[in-house]
Image (tube, helix red, strand yellow):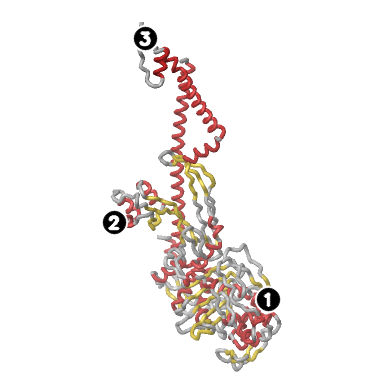
Amino acid sequence: MTRQQWGLVVLITVSAMSLVNARYHERRLFTQVDRTDRTSQKLDSDIEVLQVELTALRNPGRIDGAAKRDLKMVPLQPTEILYWPLPTMNESARGPK
Amino acid sequence: MTTPSVNIPGRFRSSAVGKSATPVLTWRATQWRSKVILGLLMLGFLAVLVRAFVLQLVNADQWQSRAIKRFERPLEIPATRGRVLDRHGGVIASSVREEQVGIVPAKFNLSNPKLDALAEILEIKPAELRRKIASQKRFFWLSKSLNLEQADRIRALRLEGVELEVDYRRYYPYGDAFAHVVGFTNAAEQGAEGLEKTHDSGLRGVKGQTRVVVDRRNTAVGQRLIADAAPGKDLQLSLDASIQSISQNALKAAMVTHRAKAASAVVIDVQTGEVLALVNEPSFDPNNRARLNADTVRNRAVTDAFEPGSTMKSFSIAAALELGRVTAATTIQTAPGKLTIGNRTIGDSHPHGLLTVEEILAKSSNVGTVKISQRMKPSELHDFYIAAGFGRVPDVGLNGATAGRLRNPQNWVPIDQATISYGHGVSVSLLQLARAYTIFARDGDLVPISFVPQPGPVVGVQVISADTARLVRGMLERATGPEGTAPKAQVMGFRVAGKTGTAHKPERGGYAKNKYVASFVGFAPAEKPRFVIAVMVDEPSAGRHYGGEVAAPIFSQIANDTLRRMQLSPNPALRIFPAVALIAEGTQ
């Protein structure tokens, strides 16, 4: 075989190997994209679950029930006055503990 | 020299032996056969070439698509259903992506050591899982939904006979608070009841499609997107979760106090006609619909019609005022507290004597209202009721909304006009009643009501003049005063207005003696109304049944909490004197 023919054989071999390599990379990248998509879906699902849980926790009915039942709180009527002591000058100067 | 004999089998033997028996001669004799074989081979190659030509060029598209089909699998991309939000963006309904696990018992190996791991992920005992699978012969879904992480762990086990499928589950974080108005979806994520049903097309979204390229082992190695999924649109409602909760708490407490069969409340924004709250009791949890019955699922405020009783007197008197048949100062003799029409006698709870029109409404005199209504033709009263929205289905976008019952005035006899003027012989839904009262809370126009937020104040259809509306508003405020029927509707620090209603329940062609519907419809603050509240209590049976005793306190509680929730300032003219001084913790 001539040199040119040898060169052609090498070129074809390299090209074929590059093609195989490219296909391999394509599949690997697809797997990674698929995995990332899955993670994204998981995060979306988690966000949705957390939002639902947050809404359920801040349900005014639940908070009202917990305040009355667990903390024994009662609604303050307009006719009631609640006196609250203001911090003295010395306490204010010290700042929060 | 003798020619060696050649033993040639078959039919050539005789001729070869007969003509010449040499190898050369034998070759010549078979040369034509070689040519035939060569020709056949050539023909074969030609056929292959023709076939290749046809495949590659003539029907290339068809064959290519068939080849693609062989290595591509169509896959549906599910579209997430839109969320339902309250007016402040709080999530009322939301779909969460989960996966369901199914078992094919015929393929599942019960002695597989990975079964314990599967049971652990499913959070059930291995023995129980084994028993469940052994008891089934056909494919079945394990009822538990899994989050995506659990599903991936199961997938990693590579168990034969286990199948996973993406599933969306609808969650309602407020539980039973919005159940009747928002409704729920069915197993296919389609709206089955309430606003979920009426707004289904917008919420549902459009599914997408993709084609996954697989290898010989059916492993995905690529994908081709055909159409991306379009998620459903979020639906923002005019409902306010806080006011809804306030209303529900008030109704729940009243149900216990009055041992009632049912109760409903509706809160409407006067300026926009938006529904801020709509609650029915008893309610149900849309997250757990295993034991539902028609009584709890029914949206009573919208689908049930009841005889409103005295709450209708406001409309009879407003019609007479608008038509100029009476003025606020016109006096009517209601003594002796009884009035006979034909063979029927109408009476007041106790005689009131000579009353002005304003006092008739404040004291809720049946006799006075009938005498006022007698100054109108039946068609005039009927037309006014129709204009106020009674007798026709309100356009609210909820299935099953009732039109109520308002008979044709041509069929009215004198007693019909009399009873209809004070809310008997006519039936309405609580939503219709609440909407109709916006006429008095506004300047005489009737606004359309809506469950979705409005961009700003709306203009309604004028039913009565602004002057008449103002007059009736004043009368309704007096009805909640000390001399009225509903002093228990008052809210400390605010002026309120409204009207009580108490009606016997219709039963077997007549009226039940001990079954009542107590109602109250009012608005606050009276000087510049912000919302209308309508309350209905069905069959209170703890001794008290009057609207002023049963429904008015519920109105007061809802109005009180809603006014403070809206951060409206108390009326400075209504001075509040402290009755109790609480000492906070740590006070010296």
Three-letter code for the amino acid on which mark 2 is drawn: Ala
Residue of label 2: B127
Query: Front-most of B279 and B229?
Result: B229
Query: From the viewer's perspective, is residue B12 above or below residue B529?
Result: above
Lower sequence index among marks 3 and 2: 3
Query: Which secondary structure lies at badge 3?
Result: loop
Q: Tags 1 and 3 in contact by the CB under 8 Å rule?
A: no
* Residue A90 visible in the shown view: no
| Rendered location of residue B452, percent (x, y) | 58, 63
Q: Give me the disc on residue B464.
A: 1
| Number of other residues with Cα within 10 Å of mark 1, as a class: few under 14, some 14 to 19, many 20 or more | many
The disc numbered 3 marks a residue on which chain?
B
Query: From the viewer's perspective, is residue B91 above or below residue B519?
Result: above
Q: Quadrant of the N terminus of chain B?
A: top left
Lower sequence index among marks 2 and 1: 2
| Number of other residues with Cα within 10 Å of mark 2, as a class: few under 14, some 14 to 19, many 20 or more | few
Three-letter code for the amino acid on which mark 3 is drawn: Thr
Whole-angstrom CA distance, mark 3 to mark 2, is 92 Å
Query: Front-most of B135 and B228?
Result: B135
Locate residue B569: give its quadrant.
bottom right
Whole-angstrom CA distance, mark 1 to mark 3, is 138 Å
Q: Residue at x 52, y 70 (%)?
A: B299
Query: Front-most of B201 and B61?
Result: B61
Three-letter code for the amino acid on which mark 1 is drawn: Ile
| Rendered location of residue B71, percent (x, y) | 47, 40
Between disc 1 and disc 3, the foreground one is: 3
